[in-house]
Amino acid sequence: MIHIVTNTHISGRGWAVLTWVVTRAAFLLFVFEVVHFPGQYIAHDVSSVYHRWYGVLSTGSFPLHDVTWQYPPGAALVILAPGLLPFLSYTAAFFWLAFLADAVILAVLLRDSRVRRGGRMAGVWVWVGGGALLGPIIYARYDVMVTAVAVAGLLLLPRRPKAGGVLAGVGAMLKVWPLLLLIGTPRGRTTRRSWISAAVTMAVIALAFHLAMPGSLSFLTFQRDRGTEVESLGATVFHIARHFGWHGTARMHYGSVEFIGPHVHLVSTAAMALSVLAFAWLLLWRLRARTYSVATPFDAAFTAVLVFTTTSRVISPQYMVWLVGVGAVCMTLRESVVRRPVALMLGATLFTTLEFPIFFEDIAHSDKLGVALIVTRNGLLVLASLSACRRLWAATVPRRAARGAVEGEPADAPAAVLTRAERVGVHDKG
């Protein structure tokens, strides 16, 4: 029986690796234009935008007057990285580095399934399958590199909080969002070590770039001035309004296709307010959470990234790479309470590929098909966000704990609960 079970585990891993190889080989054929992927050309950002930034960054300066540069200074390292492969063109080198980052994510999830989780393959399959649903866009943006850092850091957090914090800090200097991975660390020593490590890492990287290259903080202004992108939740209002006489337009603005016209600024402001409310909810959850399981740090990280993605003024298709990666980490544990939100997120990933690049013309013109796709995708993200918030709260903020918080329960209680849960295998799932 032991021999049969072992073979089953090997077979499961083998199928996952084979599926990854087949789907990723297809992605390479698509991005190298050996086979045309339906819809919009997806590699423009690499061949034109990233390559242009590479030329500027190579001179020792950030793109000071390019409003499409909206990333933290650490992103320069990713944009410059293809230069390490001088025997390839910039675009080809970038694609192969993206492929390598994808392989790293697969490898760390496979290792985790074998060494730490008793052979559980759900997380591996979420990455393999979710990436397949997302399509070749995964290699045509630098988000997969950021996700590789984030996944490795999140998996390290429970046992090596300092190392996990360092990787979260590195990720934050690449594209900000990995800092959200620290929201669910148990109070006490784990939080102190991981948060301090992340802060020191970010400070060192920011200072180094500030001293070495002018314009390292120019991205803050360009990001502030962005509007409502046509794929965002707020844009749903204008897609529908177009069919009732709204006369705005959709055109390229600050690096993405945004709506321009009456009331757009109001909706953009509302989206930012919604993000602030999401942050306030996360802080409230952090203060009230008392019952931690081994999965809580992962579930909280997924919930935080999910709600900020959903409420953003921009929901570019590559943002789904973040959610698939963090969702895969959650699924490495049976104790996770966000299985349904992860499933909803995977559904949204499929509709993301349909709306970009396949039917993006319909999205830009708010055709009936485009409206149906964007309403469905954004609706799934909203449902996933609400479900994740509800489940995380129910699993970690029991009524008695909420009362205890008012009566002055010790601040380091969650760490104690986590230790007992790991020892006896009892977890409050809500």
Image (cartoon, helix red, strand yellow):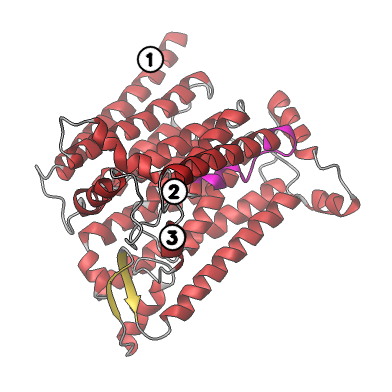
Question: Does the magenta-highlighted stretch encompass residue 397?
Answer: no
Which residue does the numbered mark 2 point to in the structure image? 175
Q: Position of residue 352 (x, y in %)?
A: 32, 57
Q: Nearer the viewer, mark 3 or mark 1?
A: 3
Residue 277, x across and y down, in percent:
61, 65
Sequence-wise, which precedes: disc 2 or disc 3?
A: 2
Q: CA distance from mark 2 to mark 1?
A: 41 Å
- Mark 2 vs mark 1: which is more N-terminal? 1
Picture layout, residue 104 above or below residue 273: above
Give me the residue at 67% from left, 52% from top: 393
Callout 1: few (<14), some (14-19), or many (20+) C-alpha neighbours within 10 Å? few
Name which quarter of the figure residue 65 lies in.
bottom left
Residue 7 is tagged as 1
Rounded to the nearest whole Å, what is the CA distance between mark 3 and mark 1?
A: 37 Å
Q: Is residue 71 left or right of residue 24?
A: right
Residues tagged 2 and 3 counted as in contact (Cβ below 8 A): no
- Extent of the magenta region: 178-191
Check disc 2 and report its element: helix, strand or loop: helix
Disc 2 residue type (three-letter): Lys
How packed mark 2 is, by other alpha carbons closer than 10 Å (few <14, some 14-19, many 20 or more), is: some
Q: Is residue 180 magenta?
A: yes
Q: Is residue 384 visible?
A: no
Circle 3 SS class: helix
Residue flagged by tag 3: what amino acid is it?
Leu
Q: Are marks 2 and 1 in contact (CB under 8 Å)?
A: no
